[in-house]
Amino acid sequence: MATDFVHSGEIVQAVINVLKGHGTSHDGGLPTTWFTASHNERLRTLAFGDLADYVTQDAFMDDLPAIIVRGLGCEATGKSGASGVLETVESVRVVHCRLYSQCYTDAGAVERNMTKARLRYAKIIGKALFNDPNKRLAVISAAGERTEVSLTCSDANGAQIVNVLFGGWDLGLDGGTRSTDEVRSLRRLPIQAWAIACDLRVTIRSG
């Protein structure tokens, strides 16, 4: 069996790279304006992280708007080969948080309806996450040039992504069927901010 099959850190970084897109124009990723210092929808944080790691509420609010990506762990798929290849699934969660005052419409106007805001931002983020038609987290330029994910592996045959599947959205709405810890925790805080979360399932063959 493969001995080097935990790729959580590299997969999280690959998800972040996909969200950033290709080059200074961020092809295939999030809107360019989300990376523009003077724009009202600029992200302050796009990084590895876990909401549970924030020490204070003020520190958390200073980082908004934020997209925080974390690995949820890996598990075997049961499809391991006789040659020592091990197939695993890495689960990844992408959490987006915003203050009410940081929400806008497609036209750039202030959005007062937080339900509409959650759904708008989920659509934008989802489009970037699944930009690769081959479902392998490649970063793709406007000219169609692919930058594939390279996983480190000490086993003879290395490791490769097989595919990336959508696991579900928690849209942060009361009574939602895809409840996640991050969204649930933020709903309990007495602050005017919300979170939404998207889960990905990344299948990998190692060894």
Image (spheres, rainbow, N blue to C red):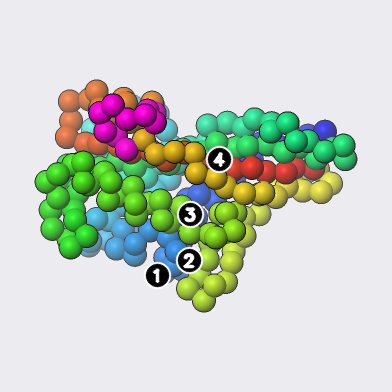
Q: Nearer the viewer, residue 191 or 184?
A: 184
| Residue 174 magenta-highlighted | yes
Q: Earlier in the sequence, mark 4 or mark 3?
A: 3
Name the disc covering residue 25, or none: 1
* CB-based contact (under 8 Å), mark 1 and mark 3: no
Name the disc covering residue 22, or none: 2
Residue at 77 percent across and 48 percent down: it is: 158
* CB-based contact (under 8 Å), mark 2 and mark 1: yes
Image quadrant of residue 32?
Answer: bottom left
- Is residue 173 visible in the rendered image? The answer is yes
Magenta span: predominant SS is: loop
Q: Nearer the viewer, residue 170 or 186?
A: 170
Query: Residue 185 location, x and y as percent?
Result: 31, 25
| Three-letter residue code for mark 2 | His
CA gap between label 2 and label 1 equals 7 Å
- Which secondary structure, mark 2? loop
Image quadrant of residue 77?
Answer: top right
CA gap between label 3 and label 2 equals 14 Å
Q: Earlier in the sequence, mark 4 or mark 2?
A: 2
Q: Earlier in the sequence, mark 1 or mark 3?
A: 1
Residue at 37 percent across and 29 percent down: it is: 177
Left/right of residue 67 with respect to residue 159 in the rendered view: left
CA gap between label 4 and label 3 equals 12 Å
Q: Earlier in the sequence, mark 3 or mark 2?
A: 2
Q: Quadrant of the N terminus?
A: top right
Query: Residue 10 location, x and y as percent?
Result: 59, 45
Query: Residue 135 location, x and y as percent?
Result: 57, 54
- Which secondary structure, mark 1? loop
| Three-letter residue code for mark 3 | Phe
Name the disc covering residue 130, or none: 3
